Structures are given as structure tokens and as C-alpha cells.
Amino acid sequence: MVIETRPRPAPISEIDVLNEANECTTDRSVDTKPLSAERAFAFWQKDIPEEYWSLGGEELRDRIALARAKLGERCVVLGHHYQREDIIQFADYKGDSFNLSRWAAEKQDVEYIVFCGVHFMAESADILSAPHQKVILPNMSAGCSMADMADPEDVYACWDELVEAGFADPDGQVVPVTYMNSAAALKAFCGKNGGIVCTSSNAPKVYDWALEGGSKVLFFPDQHLGRNTGLKKGISLDEMVVWDYSLPYGSLGGNTREQLERAKVILWRGWCSVHRRFSVAQIEKARREHPDPDGQAVTVIVHPECTMEVVQAADMDGSTEFITKTITNAPAGSTWAVGTEINLVSRLARENPDKTVFCLDPVVCPCATMYRIHPAYLCWALEELAEGRVVNQVEVDEETARHAKVALERMLSVR
Ligand code: SF4
């Protein structure tokens, strides 16, 4: 068997994210075009064979189905909710990062896990799966701009400053908590330092766990999920500070000693380019446009990676799994304005024809990095596997995996 591995992709900069968002319009379709006709950010891994570039949707679907059938039970395809329709239709399991990682930990009988999601998810699947299993990411440049905002070197430097200032110590006064959306090295850092991983599904319970073990949480990379979770746990805004990792060593992340002493939560200055687009003005507009005198007014539901102002203005917030279940189980005739990624919102609208479901943001802006899993890449990866060649395997080194697994298993044990 030939195995081809690739290095981790280069981090995604804020400029990349802004450039990609600038290409979004109100009238674009999320339907797939041949890879050669896609927007530039869909094909950053350019070195797949020429023949895949021109394949249209139907041919890709047929070839993926054929390769999938050849592989049979040796292979499973996992699809994150934010994947486009032409990918999710091939997913044996679809879910959020929490459920997909739980699945990877439980089902150890398949040889190949083809992960249609982003790099950190494939890393977590590799850490939690058995040694004989191989995790494949169809496009190695499918990363996450938020995860890249927490460079491990910056987090280690922050920790060193906290130790020097007398806040973090071996007794666990500060408990590091990393969101699932982070590099394996940071999960390992949490595993080594009495910390834990969380997802948007279990963040409040993880805060309980962390604050039983220490007096402060260092939360990275998403300040918004961290702040929204803190507020849910009754932690006030003046007990939460933001650590600005761009400031020089010795600046205490832009905080005074007194602020850090008072803080229960230290938030990393990271954010999600997709969820930061939602605004209170969009919520007000949705409510203005959907007033219903019979009590069927629009319900606004958003993801907790949105800003605090948006989460507080919404009627409900929760993980993609929560949003999916809530809308699926809602009564016929109800109206939902949703603040999360457009592929999931479009799918919910299609799957719930008896309800009105629409995205809060009129601009059709998919998560640019999830979008990099184009069907041409999935087709290529599966056809190679069917021929006995493993391409794009994501492998976490043994030492990192051992420590990261400790933090991930702590997460899985928090119910
Ligand atoms: S939606 Fe946001 S957090 Fe999720 S993968 Fe995309 S950039 Fe990262």
C-alpha cells in the first residue's frame, strides 16, 4: 500500500479571510461547479491530477458512488454540517465536531475514515481512532481561520507569562480550556497542564469542570464562545478579560495585574470569520419583516460563536446540532431566522418545507475553508483508496496524540 502524507497547511491569515468574504454576494448559489470554475479559495490544494479539474457534478457523483461502493465497509465518510450538499449526500454520518469525534472514538472497525470537514477535526479523529485506522482529509488546505488565530507558540508564551506573574502554577490555579477548533498541539498542551477540550455543545459543562479544578479558565481560541459561555455560567463581564496575543511578551496580553487577579476567565482574542458576520441590525430586520399577530413571529436562533450582542438579542443559541434538532422538531408553520453557516441553513430550509427557515445574513458567504472540500477532491481521495493508495492522510505524532487524547477524553467524559 502506498501512503502519501502531506505537511500541515500554512496558517490562514486574516487577510485571506477578508479577501474570501469580499467575494460573497447576495445572489450567489451554493451549487457545485467543476473545480476549474470554482472560486479561487475552493482549490488551494492544486496538485490533484488534471482529469479531476473538469468533471461536472453528475460525473463526480457517479464516480464517488462507485469508489465508495468498491470500498464497502472498509471506509466511512464523515461530514460536518457545514459541508456543501454535494459532499454531505455521501456522508455515512453527519454531525458537529463533537459528535463526529465521539463517533471516531467509538467505531474502531473501519480501516479508512474520510473526514469531510477541516484539518483540526481530522486531527482529533486520528487521535481518538485506533492505530490501524487511517484518517483522510480530501483537501489538505481545508483549515480553520479561527484555529489558526491560536498559534501554539503564542499560547505557550501566554502561559509562561501567567506562570511568571504567579497566576498559573502546577496546582492548576488557571485551567487551560481549548475549543475543539484548535491544533492538536494545543489539545496536547491542555492535556499536559490539567486542561480540557470543549465544543459548542458542552462548553457550559466544561466551565463547571474547569472551575471545580481551578480559580480561572484560560479559554482559546474563540473569545465569543468563551464570553457567551461565561455569561451563561453567571460570570460577569468584568470577571472576563481578553488576552491580546499580538502584544509583546510582558504586556500581560494588554491587561493589568489587578484585572487578571479579578478575572475568572481569560479569553483569547480569536473569532470565527463566518459567525462574526451576524449583527443585531440583521436580527431587528428579521423581526420587523416577520411580525405575526397570531404569535407565529420569527424565532431567531444563532450559534454561540456569534458576538455577545447577537447571542443576547437572539431568542436561542446553541451548537449546530442544537440548531438542527430545534428546527427539525419545531411545529409546522413556524418561522426561523438562523445565524450560522449558509450550507447548513439552506439544508434546514430544504429539509423543513413546512416551516420558513432563512439565514440572518442576506450575503451568501459559506465557510471558505469547509468549502475547500470540493467533490473533485473527495472523488480523487476515494478512487485512490479504492486502488490501494492512501492520499492526504492526517497523522498526529505519537507524543502530541498521547497528551491531546487526555484532554479529549476529559471532554468526552463531561456529560
Ligand atoms: S465556520 Fe468558523 S470556526 Fe467553523 S471551520 Fe469555518 S472558520 Fe472555522
Image (tube, rainbow, N blue to C red):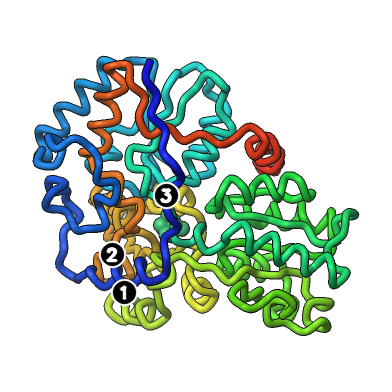
What residue is drawn where x is 53% and y is 20%?
A: 108
Please name the amino acid that badge 2 sits on. Answer: Cys
**Along the horizontal axis of the image, is 384 left or right of 331?**
left
Q: Residue 306 or 145: which is nearer the viewer?
A: 145
Q: Going from the N terminus, do you reach mark 1 or mark 3 first?
A: 3
Determine which residue is flagged by label 3: 9
**Residue in the picture at 62% in, 68% down:** 268
Above or below, comparing residue 94 to residue 231 in the picture: above
Q: Is residue 240 visible?
A: no
> Which residue occupies 39% across, 61% down?
340
Q: Position of residue 348 (x, y in %)?
A: 31, 51
What mark, if any, has residue 292 been given in the picture?
1
For numbered disc 1, what is the local secondary structure?
loop
In this figure, which residue is indicated by the disc labeled 2? 365
Mark 1 or 2, nearer chain start:
1
Disc 1 residue type (three-letter):
Asp
Residue 25 in which image quadrant: bottom left
